[in-house]
Image (spheres, coloured by chain):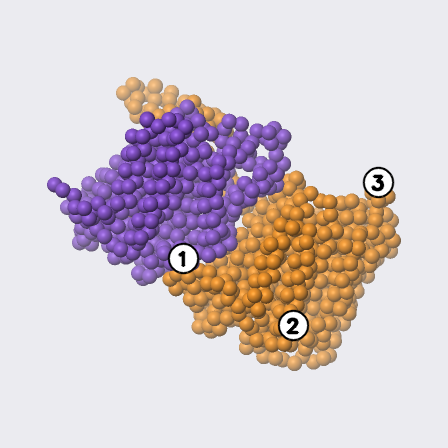
Amino acid sequence: MAVLINGFLGHKYSHDLAGRIAFGSVGLSFLCALTVFMGVMADPTPREVIAYSWIFGGDLHVNLGFLIDPLSAVMLMVVTGVGFLIHVYSVGYMHGEEGFTRFFVYMNLFMVSMLLLVMGNNYLVLFIGWEGVGLCSYLLIGYYFHKVSAAKAATKAFVVNRIGDAGFLLAIFLMFVNFKTLDYTKALANVGQLSTEMATAIALCLLVGAIGKSAQIPLYTWLPDAMEGPTPVSALIHAATMVTAGVYMVVRNHVLFDMAPVAMATVGIIGGLTALFAATIGLVQNDIKRVLAYSTVSQLGYMFLACGVGAYTAAIFHLVTHAFFKALLFLSAGAVIHSLNGEQDIRKMGGLSKKIPITYKVFLIGTLAIAGIPPLAGFWSKDEIMAHAFVNHYYVLYLFAAIGAFLTSFYMFRLTYLTFYGQSRVDPEVDKHIHESPPMMTVPLMVLAGLAILGGFMGVPPEHGWLHGFLASVATPLGAVPHEVSMGTLMGLMAVAISIALGGWGLAHYMYSVKPGMADEWSERYAGAYRTFLNKYWVDELYDAIIVEPCKRLGQIWDWFDQNVIDRFIRGIGHGADASGAGITWTEKHVIYAGLNVVGYANHLLAWSWRKLQTGMVHHYAAVIVIGLFILVHFLFVWLLGTSVL
Amino acid sequence: MSIPLADLVTILPECLVVLAACVLFVLDPVMPASKKDFLAWMCVGTLVVCFFITAAGMGEKTFAFSNLVVVDSYASFWKLLLYVVSGMTILLSIGYLKEERIDLAEFYGFIMLSLTGMMIMVSGSDLLVIYLGIELMSISLYIMCGFKRFEAKSIEASAKYFILGAFSSGLLLYGISLIFGAAGSTQLVEIAAAVNARGLDDPLVLIAMMLIIVGFAFKVAAVPFHMWTPDVYQGAPTTVTAFMAVASKAASFAAFLRVLLEGFGGVKPNWSGLILGMCILTLILGNIVAIVQTNIKRMLAYSSIAHAGYALIGVVVAGWMGTGAGVASAGVSSIMLYLAIYSFMTMGAFAMVAILRRGGLEGEELDDFTGLAKRHKGAAFLMMLFMISLAGIPPTAGFIGKFYLFMAAVNAGLTWLAVVGLVFAAVSAFYYLRVVMVMYMREPSSEQELETRLALSPTAMVVLAFAVAGVVFLGVYPGPLVSIATSSALPLP
């Protein structure tokens, strides 16, 4: 097994340089994953493979090893399977783009990191993969490097993620301090020794990492901006795989969360809020990819909500189905953009259903799936999450989820209607060139569409589907009391879910198909809400104003201080002292002179002119040292002797 | 008076290095200009020999010159690191000095002398010997800073460094004389006894300790004694900057730790509290100010201040109240590990600055790196690797270094300090990745494309290869280095 896994990792590395056959290597790894998966199906006991001893010394001993159990097997299938389809699609999509090879190098690097992430047998390997996917995401968002917005979005994504990572790393440290090991199996087996407080602390730190990577409130702002990257990247990284890493991590550590009710509740609340919040923003966006991005944030919210109510299997179920239909939606959105020569604004689309019929059909399937229309995939998984919230008495979360589901259905059908129905609003110039995408792109779309239709059946019947049995050993909440819910309740909830989905569809149909003018009317009538949604609650601006700008300004001030103020200020004093014999007038002149200099040198580049250098400056650095020394001595005196030197 | 042969054997590497320097200074005037490279190679050869001598003696603990000098694994670890770094500096300088038209062979001689000073620092078990080492190191560095003697910046850096350095040496020496008054000796062992007996209630001990801490804080560029760093780093020739940022910092940390732990071990809680304050200030200032820099050398100067801040976390851990010997020694070994890793990545980053040229000048502005990925794929990739490592992102070595330091802090119960470190490590990604962004995501102007080139000499390639190997290998397989660092950490009182 070790040979197998390392074999395909190594294989992929060697093919990195030969971008064009990259998808071949991913396909091969998919086949390997399939074999592994079959193996796990036959025998679901977890098994570990240690590649080599990675860090040792002191009491810290970490192996670079892999753990294959049902959970990682499912993730493996999703990552390699969807990844493979997206790679195939990318070959068509990126054809003729500059830096084709570079693109596939990054994509494959991403696949390697992602596989490390899901297969690692300890937290450190998970963390390596975690940072690796972040780095690849950074590189791929900034792929169109001539776009300034792309470069900015890339940096933003990375820095926001790093904040989350800091939390994750802290959790790793705490875990090591408590367990003296970083292996999942050993650490999680000993969770029982922890006090509830410590478990809560660790779980919350993990959660910080998860919300950073999975774009939950309050660290979600990077994901919509990440849409600056090429569309297959959005599909692979920012919809199907990387962003679900947070969910994977929570499920992997569910034992910890089970022990910490506070952390658990936090997960649920964050998930519920995000599901609703992002859906409202999605209602009014006009960029086809941004709508999908907010929908991703919202769907991830559902997965967190599921974790929060202890429905880990449902979370993974939704993760899988979401990977299918969201990859499908993104890729077909990419096909639309491709055929419209790069147009992303849905106000400049419309009436496309005749011109690109295949894309239209698969997009519609994706929409039906995400909106929760049975029997497509999204219905089963979303319904299961909502049912869990309901039967476990989290009624508020249920309400959030229900409203979110209604909004989801609405904005997805809005997107479909605006893009594919009604009058064509396409630029006449572009209109002439509209064409269906090549088979290289449409075939993966059709496969994904098939998965989006059928994928839900692995979780049917609810609670007792195939997936539930498969994941039972790894995703059953600790100390859960299996309570049988009457079939009637379940059916009732299902009926509610269906009517919600149909309601959203109906409203969208009415607003955008029956009475097309109505949407504009509403946006004027509720201008306040409309603008708030359109501007995403001004959260970006808020973060800029309270975090980014002050930080930068502090840096500038300090830099300027280092370069100017101290020199000038002390020079003024120094001169004053030197000249005390020469009379007060002289001193004043120089102090004022120094003061003027402070203003004059505000522009620090000017201040850099070395001609202005005077030996005086050095004294003043020295003076700072003396002052520093004096302060330190003083503190120590006060501290130790209780007396002041002064 | 005769010097026992055994003592000379103990300090054989030091003798060899000095000898090489002397031979160099003698040969320099008589060698034809075209053969000067030979002298550089002679120095590198000496270093290789010394490396093997020191490595062979690892694990023993020998005193020499009536306990003035000690050669233990701790000293040997640092010496090995210093050989590598000095060798890299020399190799990098061979091409660089020619580009800058300052290819005088005495440059290598100064590096060797400075290295001798550092070796004495890490081996000294007597404050005066350590002081001598510091002076030998510093005086050579002052001269090297001013080596671009046609540039005002360089002369200024030299003068500034000299005056401030002399000043801080003065403080240090004053501290040493005070502690001599209290202990009647400058030997660390005697000092430890006196400190234990008198405690800090004695103002003499207290002030002496403060002065010594300030003297060292200046050398490692900890806030608020960092003021010299940006100006000097920016003005000095780039290879000298690299040497200062790496070797002199490592040696200073080594001596600093030895003095604190062996000399002032009895009052650990007191100094660790103070250093904690410095550490936090250093982290904040170094990282925040680096964000707004537009000159890479200056940015790296602030980054080196920030890295000193991370390393100080280890010092705090080593002295923290109530930590067991195991945890405290983990603090020491994590500093050793951190600085070893830091050496490779910083050396690499400065090497890139040194070989990138724009017109007749060095490409030291951030702007000069614009679109580097378009023109020189390999160079841009290496620079990216160093930046990623400096930011502490796995799987590079920088991550391992930070991981151990923060882990040591958490083990010592200083979780909140680890949080501070982590937050600033996250902030640091911002300015390191800006370099990556500029290289990969901006188009170079046509004028820039014409003007910039890589002055890549074969020896510089060797240096880069070393640095990359360090950054990647130590990231993927840090085991051996970790176990060496752990086993050679200072035995704690």
> Mark 3 belongs to which amino acid?
Glu
Task: Kindly identify the residue that appears in the image at 58 percent across and 64 percent down.
Answer: A5
The image position of residue A423, as x and y in percent, is 87, 49
The residue that mark 2 highlights is: A38
- Work out whether A2 lies above or below A107: below
Tell me, what hue is chain A?
Answer: orange
Q: Secondary structure at mark 2?
A: helix
Dot in front, 1 or 3: 1
Please tell me the colour of chain B. Answer: purple
Q: CA distance from mark 1 to mark 2?
A: 38 Å
Q: Nearer the viewer, mark 3 or mark 2?
A: 2
The reply to whether residue A556 is visible in this rendering is: no
Farthest residue, direction left: B1
Residue that badge 3 annotates: A429
Neighbourhood count class around disc 3 (C-alpha, 10 Å): few under 14, some 14–19, many 20 upward:
few
Residue A319, given in percent of the width and then of the height, sits at 66, 64
The label shown at residue A261 is: none
Q: Is residue B407 above or below residue A190?
A: above
Look at mark 1 in the image and give the residue it sits on: B480
Whether residue A108 appears in this view of the structure is: yes
Q: Amino acid at mark 1?
A: Pro
- Residue drawn where x is 17% and y is 48% of the image: B66
